[in-house]
Image: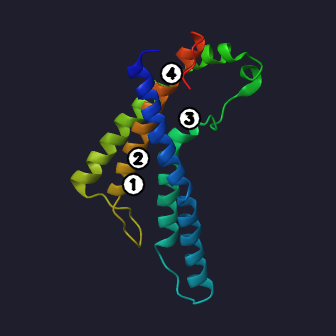
Amino acid sequence: MPKVITSYVKGVDYVSEKFGRLCMYSVFIMIGTLLLGALTRNVLNYPLSWTVEMAQFTMTAYYFLGGAYSMQTDDHVRMDLIYDRCSEKTKAKIDLVTSFILMFYLVCLLIGSISSTVYAIEYGQRKFSQWNPSMIPIKVIMVFGISLMILQTISMFFKDLAKVKGKPIS
């Protein structure tokens, strides 16, 4: 593989890993937020209206920002009925084909998320609830996370192509 492709793969993998590992810790933020809500509601008899929604936002960020890392480490869900029995080279060939399907899906998601983010910014969209938080931060995170998954999909495509050619990128 050309040096520029190898550099791209290593750069994207590095960024995906850093964001993925950072996102792993956001689960503790979510747990702490939910624990705070439960304690204030049940022990202090003072319910906080924002804790459940904050936990939802944290979980959404966790999914979007951790998606690329999940793809990189091959921890995503896959139907292994036939795939698991194939050789590494055959798996790479299958992954090359499915990369195009995944890319189409992610580009459609990106277009929709950009449109949704622009709408949220233009109209100052807020979640209709007692807390009434702005939707802009989570929508920006959504666009960034989907973009990172697109970059990771391209990286995986190059890795699979290198495997098929018999010269894997490590």
Q: Residues within 10 Å of mark 1 (few under 14, many from 20)?
A: some
* Closer-to-camera residue (162/153): 162
Q: Choose mark 2 or mark 4, whichever is in front.
A: 4
Circle 1: element type = helix
Q: CA distance from mark 1 to mark 2?
A: 6 Å
Above or below, 96 relative to 40: above
Q: Residue at x 59, y 20 (%)?
A: 95
Provide the residue designation for mark 3: 72
Q: Earlier in the sequence, mark 3 or mark 2?
A: 3
Q: Are marks 1 and 2 in contact (CB under 8 Å)?
A: yes
Q: CA distance from mark 1 to mark 3?
A: 23 Å
Q: Residue at x 44, y 41 (%)?
A: 15
Residue 3 place in picture, x, y as percent: 41, 19
Left or right side of 74 for 107: left
Residue 141 place in picture, x, y as percent: 39, 50
Question: Which amino acid type is marked by label 2?
Answer: Met
Question: Which amino acid type is marked by label 1?
Answer: Ile
Residue 54 place in picture, x, y as percent: 47, 66
Q: Choose mark 3 or mark 2, whichever is in front.
A: 3
Q: CA distance from mark 1 to mark 4?
A: 28 Å
Provide the residue designation for mark 2: 142
Circle 3: element type = helix
Q: CA distance from mark 2 to mark 4?
A: 22 Å
